[in-house]
Image (cartoon, rainbow, N blue to C red):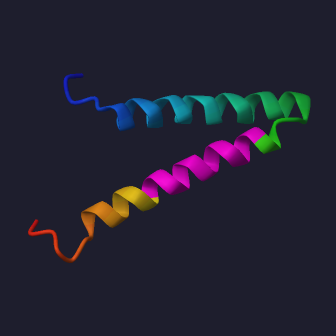
Amino acid sequence: MKNLSTDKIAVIGLAIALNLSIIVGIYTGNGSELQMSIASFFVGYIGRIFQEKHRKDDPK
């Protein structure tokens, strides 16, 4: 629990929100706009993490 950064907290919240919107969308037939917005946040976050880990100037 001590290693939770702001990014990790945001991703956990987005994962919960995406799951809830999918469940609600199944029962109501709505919510595709919300699901696409949350999914685009995930793609952006994953892209940023990938870029940070695979920089050529990074000595790691």
The relative height of residue 13 versus residue 7 in the rendered view (above or below) is above
- Residue 48 locus on image (x, y percent): 40, 58
Toward the front, the furthest residue is 57
Residue pictured at 82% horizontal, 36% vertical: 31
User: Magenta residues, as a range?
Assistant: 34-46
Total labels drawn: 0
Residue pictured at 56% horizontal, 47% vertical: 41
Quarter of the rendering containing residue 49: bottom left
Residue pictured at 9% horizontal, 69% vertical: 59
- Residue 26 locus on image (x, y percent): 83, 34
The relative height of residue 40 versus residue 14 in the rendered view (above or below) is below
Specify whether residue 39 is painted magenta: yes
Residue pictured at 36% horizontal, 35% vertical: 8
The relative height of residue 54 versus residue 21 in the rendered view (above or below) is below
Specify whether residue 44 is painted magenta: yes
The relative height of residue 40 versus residue 35 in the rendered view (above or below) is below
Query: Left of 1 or right of it: where is 30?
Result: right
- Residue 10 locus on image (x, y percent): 45, 33
